[in-house]
Image: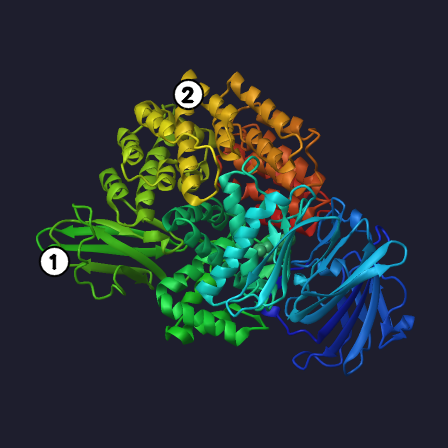
């Protein structure tokens, strides 16, 4: 397909005020009758044909114009478009019927079957696979939907909005009518028909309106939806309290399906979820799964205002709803759990996916200005960096002005399809700030580097920071302008407290420096001693901070910084520096490096009387292999990185074994499981301690893990034991894997964990193991969750084996992508994310990765999704 450009945006030539859909669910003979009330758009072109979008559609019968059959010459219908050559100059009604075979829809876009249920996925461009339409987000319509189906096959019939009517029909069939009074774009359309179990609850909004809540799941799984329901009610309350946003329909329905391309979908009043983000019990779900459910439930619910009531004018504005909604779900999670720990975990996520994306061939701005396949822009940059941009905005203008800006946005644009400029204008008005330069965060790709040099003049007591910003070149963008970068900061005195900041007049607010040009100098006078700088506190900007602090400074900050995020950051920086040097020495034939002071710092956190378990766990986890890859930047050898990391873990384990053992035994399983943050923190620290002990390699530690695995009363403890064992080549590992497979043979979501853990084993035999597992009865190339666990787990979760020096990992991924592409291009394309940093590899691997990418590129036909990504990867 041709590239679509933001600069070419034109208002639609027609508007569709109302849509009446009559959907007859009948297997391969499913019929959709669509009655559209259209009118020319005063803001569009006059006298042009009406062209509706389609994708693989078959028209059935003759279309009607204002109730009368159209003659054949007046229209044209192909699988990809319906054209009415000379539409009326005033409002008119068009009726079109399409015939669908949902079971044959393996792309899982449009109307498809998941198990025995019928369901839909329309974002971004799936509605055009159901019926011909103006499939663009700036066409908003009021929908009424009538669904008819076999009563036994689909006793549950749901669509957006409120229920209007239902009843029985002849031939064991029945129907339901739904009406959604809120105008919406077609990407928010949804319907579900199936034999599903349900849990129900209700909610009273702040203004007293009553809402019926329901979560539909596979029969027998009802109890596992309880946590999702609880998270939903907490989300509804929080949005009222934190943003003043109330729910607006009489019902809110969620349906969990097992075949889903992404995490979930925010369809108005009828969210459809990947069941992974709904179903949880203590025996089948880990703490991380519970946290995932809480945040995805919240995210989709929050879209009701940021995405649905106010939607995007075009798909370039995707971050308008996604970045903002991620920001909102992150704030919710921070309020529900521990602020600093959640911030650390969000930043870890950003660094491990978005930073590499921003530094490689797939880099694009938070608001891209061109795309060939929109599905490929549901990225960490649009979502996670998009959320960071909102957070910076709040830091810059302050909490109160931020809230006023949000209120203005909701008041001014409710019911509209908006742009980033309109959104930012609300904050400029509410705060009085000029935000023109801030908009560069939406248009310039690449992670800004902020390079800091310190100067200390003891004689005058002056401490100065020279700060330079540099935004690296990214595909299609070489010359970048300086950005607005808010740096929260403090200066640590030798007693560990923040010193009084002295007298630089350009410190914007207490503890905030704002960079606006390429270079700045900040001077603080009247200090008694050189302070240790603590910059970018709480990760106030999504940047790479480069400052050459000594190990002493870093380890001091790790213990004393008043900002918990920066305590963690200082520790990460100290470990990163050591690991980068260690990897370099290993490549030159040396041995992995240890550093007693790093182990000591971990021990002191583990042994602290007032220990925060969740924080202690984060503090003790080494930087990931991806972090180190990014830090090294060029000529990367994944084996050396792995060896350096493993070597440091072994050294830590050996040095502080007694502390680890004491910590581990002090955190014994307390029996009854609750998923709250405090208990989860306890289990997470227990897992980290066990992992370090097991890496140490002694039989005793392996026995400890084996016991934890066998005695576990919840999935978190069982999985953390299995994960630790998976890293050691020991017979216990295989015994535990077989036991797990037997125990959970009938639990597909649990087996996903089993697939992913095996795929991540950092050993030469893993590729063959993965190939073998593709023939396991529980694996299916038709199910995205299975593919992501096994193939994604290997390609994105196993750096040494995916990047095998013989290129076999790359060739394997190419084979899977090519096999999957004709069936499910979206999921096939996502797997290619594993190549996001291929250009940074050392020459041998780099050549082999390129060869695999070229092999994919040579195949014809390729889907738009895969072809777009491979072309960009190779550019
Ligand atoms: N807004 C939703 C995006 C989504 C999606 C996009 C493309 C193909 C399938 C999809 N399923 C869901 C999810 C969200 O961000 O809330
Ligand atoms: Zn979203």
Residue located 87% across and 53% down the image? 172
Q: Which residue in the structure is indicated by mark 2?
A: 701
- The part of the image, by quadrant, that contains residue 89 is bottom right
Check whether the beta carbons of the residues at disc 2 and disc 1 lie within 8 A of each other.
no
Q: Quadrant of ligand 1?
A: bottom right
In front: label 2 or label 1: 2
Q: Which residue in the structure is indicated by mark 1?
A: 526
Q: Nearer the viewer, residue 767 or 189?
A: 189
How is the model colour-coded? rainbow
Q: Is residue 404 left or right of residue 852?
A: left
User: Looking at the picture, does residue 551 appear above or below residue 26?
Assistant: above
Q: Position of residue 237 (x, y in %)?
A: 49, 60
Q: Position of residue 413 (x, y in %)?
A: 54, 74
Does residue 365 appear in the picture of this structure? no
- The part of the image, by quadrant, that contains residue 390 is bottom left
Q: Is residue 172 left or right of residue 827?
A: right
Residue located 68% across and 73% down the image? 12
- Badge 2 element: helix
Q: Quadrant of the N terminus?
A: bottom right
Task: Name the N-terminal-most of marks 2 and 1.
Answer: 1
Q: Nearer the viewer, residue 438 or 806?
A: 438
Q: Which mark is residue 640?
A: none
User: Looking at the picture, does residue 305 appear above or below residue 67?
Assistant: above
Q: Is residue 445 left or right of residue 273?
A: left
Residue located 31% across and 27% down the image? 659
| Dot 2 beta carbon under 8 Å from ligand 1 | no
The furthest residue to the left: 459
Q: Residues within 10 Å of mark 2 (few under 14, many from 20)?
A: some
Residue located 45% across and 44% down the image? 676
- Badge 1 element: loop
Q: Residues within 10 Å of mark 1 (few under 14, many from 20)?
A: some
């Amino acid at each position: 397909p041709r590239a679509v450009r933001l600069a070419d945006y034109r208002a639609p030539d027609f508007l569709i005020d109302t849509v009446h859909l009559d959907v007859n669910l009948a297997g391969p003979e499913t019929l959709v009758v669509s009655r559209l009330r259209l009118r020319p758009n005063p803001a569009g072109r006059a006298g042009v044909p009406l062209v509706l979008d389609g994708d693989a559609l078959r028209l059935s019968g003759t279309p009607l114009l204002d109730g009368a059959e159209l003659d054949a010459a007046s229209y044209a219908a192909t699988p990809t478009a319906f054209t009415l050559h000379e539409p009326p100059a005033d409002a008119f009604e068009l009726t079109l019927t399409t015939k669908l075979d949902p079971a044959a829809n393996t792309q899982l876009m449009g109307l498809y079957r998941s198990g025995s249920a019928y369901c839909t996925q329309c974002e971004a461009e799936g509605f055009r696979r159901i019926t011909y339409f103006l499939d663009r987000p700036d066409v908003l319509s009021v929908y009424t939907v009538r669904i008819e189906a076999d009563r036994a096959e689909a006793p549950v019939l749901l669509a957006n909005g409120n229920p209007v009517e239902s009843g029985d029909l002849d031939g064991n069939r029945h129907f339901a009518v739904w009406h959604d009074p809120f105008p919406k774009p077609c990407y928010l359309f949804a319907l579900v028909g199936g034999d599903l179990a349900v849990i129900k609850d209700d909610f009273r909004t702040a203004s007293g309106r009553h809402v019926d809540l329901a979560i539909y799941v596979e029969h027998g799984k009802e109890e596992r939806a309880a946590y999702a329901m609880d998270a939903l009610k907490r989300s509804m309350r929080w949005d009222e309290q934190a943003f003043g946003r109330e729910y607006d329909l009489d019902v809110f329905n969620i349906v969990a399906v097992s075949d889903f391309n992404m995490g979930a979908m925010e369809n108005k009043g009828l969210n459809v979820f990947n069941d992974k983000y709904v179903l949880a019990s203590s025996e089948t779900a880990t703490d991380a799964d519970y946290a995932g459910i809480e945040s995805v439930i919240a995210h989709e619910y929050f879209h009701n205002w940021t995405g649905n009531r106010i939607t995007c004018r075009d798909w370039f504005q995707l971050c308008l709803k996604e970045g903002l909604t991620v920001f909102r779900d992150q704030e919710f999670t921070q309020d529900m759990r521990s602020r600093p720990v959640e911030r650390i975990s969000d930043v870890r996520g950003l660094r491990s996916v978005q930073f590499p994306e921003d530094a490689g061939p797939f880099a694009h701005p938070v608001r891209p200005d061109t795309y060939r396949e929109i599905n490929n822009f549901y990225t960490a940059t649009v979502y996670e960096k998009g959320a960071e941009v909102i957070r910076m905005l709040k830091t810059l203008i302050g909490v109160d002005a931020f809230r006023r800006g949000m209120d203005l946005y909701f008041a001014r644009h409710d019911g509209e399809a908006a742009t980033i400029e309109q959104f930012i204008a609300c904050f400029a008005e509410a705060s009085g700030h000029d935000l023109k330069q801030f908009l560069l965060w939406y248009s310039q790709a690449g992670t800004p580097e902020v390079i800091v040099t310190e100067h200390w003049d003891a004689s005058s007591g002056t401490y100065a920071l020279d700060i330079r910003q540099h935004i690296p070149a990214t595909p299609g963008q070489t010359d970048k302008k300086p950005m607005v970068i808010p740096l929260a900061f403090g200066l640590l005195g030798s007693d560990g407290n923040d010193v009084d900041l002295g007298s630089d007049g350009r410190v914007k607010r207490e503890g905030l420096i704002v960079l606006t040009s390429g270079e700045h100098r900040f001077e603080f006078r009247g200090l008694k001693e050189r302070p240790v700088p603590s910059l970018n506190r709480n990760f106030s900007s999504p940047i790479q901070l480069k400052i050459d602090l000594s190990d002493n400074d870093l380890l001091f900050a790790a213990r004393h910084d008043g900002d918990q995020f920066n305590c963690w950051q200082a520790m990460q920086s100290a470990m990163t520096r050591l690991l980068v040097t260690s990897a370099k020495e290993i490549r030159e034939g040396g041995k992995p490096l240890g550093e007693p002071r790093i182990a000591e710092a971990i021990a002191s956190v583990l042994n602290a009387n007032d220990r925060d378990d969740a924080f202690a766990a984060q503090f003790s986890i080494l930087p990931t292999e991806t972090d180190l890859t990014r830090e090294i930047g060029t000529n990367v050898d994944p084996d050396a990185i792995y060896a350096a990391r493993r070597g440091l873990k072994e050294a830590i384990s050996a040095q502080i074994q007694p502390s680890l053992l004491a910590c581990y035994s002090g955190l014994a399983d307390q029996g009854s499981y609750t998923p709250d943050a405090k208990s989860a923190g306890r289990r997470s620290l227990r897992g980290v301690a066990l992992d370090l002990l097991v890496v140490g390699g002694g039989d005793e530690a392996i026995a400890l893990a084996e016991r934890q695995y066998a005695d576990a009363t919840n999935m978190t403890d069982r999985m953390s034991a299995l994960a630790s064992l998976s890293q050691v080549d020991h017979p216990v590992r295989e015994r535990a894997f077989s036991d797990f497979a037997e125990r959970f043979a009938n639990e597909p979501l649990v087996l996903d964990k089993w697939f992913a853990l095996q795929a991540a084993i950092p050993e030469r035999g893993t590729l063959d193991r993965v190939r073998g597992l593709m023939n396991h009865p529980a694996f299916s190339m038709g199910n995205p969750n299975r593919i992501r666990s096994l193939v994604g787990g290997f390609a994105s979760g196993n750096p040494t084996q995916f990047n095998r020096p013989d290129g076999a990992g790359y060739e394997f991924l190419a084979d899977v992508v090519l096999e999957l592409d004709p069936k499910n291009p979206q999921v096939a394309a996502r797997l290619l994310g594993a190549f996001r940093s291929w250009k940074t590899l050392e020459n041998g691997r780099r050549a082999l990765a390129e060869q695999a990418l070229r092999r994919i590129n040579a195949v014809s036909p390729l889907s738009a999704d895969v072809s777009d990504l491979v072309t960009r990867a190779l550019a």
